[in-house]
Image: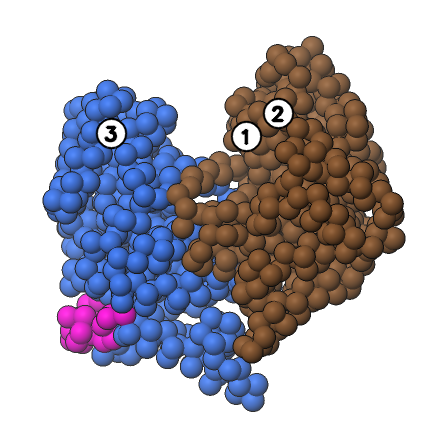
Chain colours: A brown, B blue
Amino acid sequence: MENFTFYSPTFFSFGKGMENEAGKLAKRFGATKILIHYGCGSVVRSGLLDRVKKSLDEENLPFVELGGVQPNPRSGLVYKGIDLCKKENIDFVLAVGGGSVIDSAKAIAAGTCYDGDFWDFYSGKYIEEAIPIGTILTIAAAGSEGSPDSVITNEDGMYKRGASGDAIRPKFSILNPELTQTLPPYQTACGITDIMAHLYERYLTNTKEVEVTDRLIEALLLTMIHEGPRVIEDPNNYEARANIMWAGMMAHNNSVGVGRSQDWNSHDIEHELSAKYDCAHGAGLAVTLPAIFTYVMKHDVMRFAKVATRVWGCQMDFDNPEATAKAGIEALRNFYISIGMPKNFDELGAKKEDIPQLVDTLCDGNGRPGYINGFVKLDKNDCTKIYELMI
Amino acid sequence: MENFTFYSPTFFSFGKGMENEAGKLAKRFGATKILIHYGCGSVVRSGLLDRVKKSLDEENLPFVELGGVQPNPRSGLVYKGIDLCKKENIDFVLAVGGGSVIDSAKAIAAGTCYDGDFWDFYSGKYIEEAIPIGTILTIAAAGSEGSPDSVITNEDGMYKRGASGDAIRPKFSILNPELTQTLPPYQTACGITDIMAHLYERYLTNTKEVEVTDRLIEALLLTMIHEGPRVIEDPNNYEARANIMWAGMMAHNNSVGVGRSQDWNSHDIEHELSAKYDCAHGAGLAVTLPAIFTYVMKHDVMRFAKVATRVWGCQMDFDNPEATAKAGIEALRNFYISIGMPKNFDELGAKKEDIPQLVDTLCDGNGRPGYINGFVKLDKNDCTKIYELMI
């Protein structure tokens, strides 16, 4: 096992009605003037935003609002949020929404404490300082509610990049599974796909014998396989929603990723798709994962056979482990299809003639060195073949 | 799933050589004068204490020392530590040792901020305030390095009781698996047993459909079953030590216990044994768990069948789930025996003629209401029968 540090000082408040604690929690973590950041109106229509404002009012906490975050959140709104925070002397950002809203809030929180262009953080600079953040989560997916990460789309070129820093870990996150019950099945399935991708990215390691991390990841994948279909069948299944919501947080606060190398090539490959076609990140991952896994499987057949047998219930073929590894990838592909995810470029709205451009941006764009690296180092030729497997 | 909050703001520094960071971490978390608390000399003999002192010296952090913590840590030394902290204006307690040392340090840290008798906390009063604590762990077992809990033996009557409070969660914990490599096999096995007991206490729930927590517990049990025998066979197996050490923390910081009722009857029943006979807590648990599980199995046969099939690899007997449940309990018993744990009162050094007294202290002692309660409510008659199953 590799040496590591792990620090997850987020206070999680989980369950029915917990959003009414937002004011108390914001006060506990030092807020005196708040920016409420949200998306495109569903939190307004559902009445959630009103409940949150009431909770802040009860604690005499003043606030300003900035809505309008789009899925695949954009740099333009971040700049606007930073200006607003500086002008209004905001000292706490409260994100009410899903991963896009939270990621946008994180970018604003970091940019508010920084004199330069916030995009520096999305070009490799570590985030050392940010005003504190709280979140009220409305979709189980990105895991941003417990992570030190953020992904933003740069509108100047339409490409996505990530930034990190312990300073942008939320001080508190409120997770009420009821808030996810109004999500359309497609969005729910996108969330399930994203959570499972976060787990696979951590499963694909080149570090040997980190059994505890393998087992914890398998546990969360098994949870998703059990609960995913239940929630697609019955969107009001609170228990299934709750299990998925906590699994989504656990999948990405890195408690199941310690002590070893991770992958993240799948996310890089997908980010080009959702940046270019504005498809849902989860939908892009559903097409990406089976393709990249098929391509890199031979790098460590036994690892893919392990997840196939332990998670997907495949019988181990001791004469031909590769057959087991392949069966596990097929099981993943079929699972995604079964919950309504797209299976190829066509269903995603992507075009095969764009592949050269996707590969260029992926491998060369924004200062990249001509390849991406994770479980396997992938150059432009590799990435071309992986995109071709999605056609 | 029940509503819950989860807050684990401990900074974990894991791996080889990490103890040399103790000074930096203590400074980061605000220490200006430190009490180093430790046990009965092994940390002196191994040179660990000298490395820790050097690390504090390098940060110009003054310290005083208090050694002498015994296994099943005693109230007497806690009073001494509180007096010392008050006299010396200590503002940080650094525990260097195992669960007993850490639990003693937690009691001292809480008592130092309290005008009354620290035992109030071990009689049910929640710990609201304590001076901050850091730990350098030398045995994977109690999980106290990541928990808000402490157990102390009251020398006035020789009985053990627990206390809790977020204030006694360590600010940082340093986990270097190498530090556990010199442990005798028996102590290592006691630690393995304790970790598995923490998992079973969380597994035995009356809350339905918390699949994510079930799966995470199973993952850690499977890790222990894989790694336990490896480390007993080769005490220098770093990877096995590392997996066990992280599993031990995860087993008890409650990240695998959220959203549901838990048991803890096994711990209560065992505490009477280690308090009376001064046996190792883990050894007592090895004798206790199979007995209590046999007694309470019928309360929820399917739960015991679940752990039997998913963790112990038993075949589900669909015509007779009780047979599967029993097979899982037998597998647990045999596992403990295989790693060198005692299997009954005789091997533990306990006496059947003491059972009435054990039951009295357990159910009536220190203000208890005549029974203990968890997965199942157990009165004195039940507890008598459970102890009798250990003969």
Q: Residues within 10 Å of mark 2 (few under 14, many from 20)?
A: many
Q: Chain of mark 1?
A: A
Residue toward you, A249 or B353: A249
Give the Cα distance between marks 3 and 1: 27 Å
Residue B287: quadrant of the picture: bottom left
Residue A4: quadrant of the picture: top left
Residue A344's disc number: none
Q: Nearer the viewer, mark 2 or mark 1?
A: 2
Do marks 3 and 2 share a chain?
no
Question: What quarter of the picture does the N terminus of chain B occupy?
Answer: bottom right
Residue A165's disc number: 1
In the orientation shown, which residue stands out farthest toward the top?
A87
Q: Residues within 10 Å of mark 3 (few under 14, many from 20)?
A: many
Q: Is residue B346 magenta?
A: yes
Vertical order, A334 against A274 (above or below): below
Vertical order, A30 against B147 (above or below): above
Total numbered circles: 3
Which x, y percent locates residue B38?
18, 41
Instruction: Judge whether residue A188 can be spotted in this image.
Output: no
Q: Chain of mark 2?
A: A
Residue linked to disc 3? B55
Residue A121's disc number: 2
Q: Are marks 3 and 2 in contact (CB under 8 Å)?
A: no
Which residue occupies 79% across, 53% down? Answer: A388
Start-end of magenta stretch = B339-360
Residue toward you, A89 or B292: A89
Q: Could you say whether the residue bearing mark 1 is in a helix, strand or loop?
A: loop
Q: Are marks 2 and 1 in contact (CB under 8 Å)?
A: yes
Which residue occupies 63% across, 41% down? Answer: A372
Badge 3 amino acid: Ser
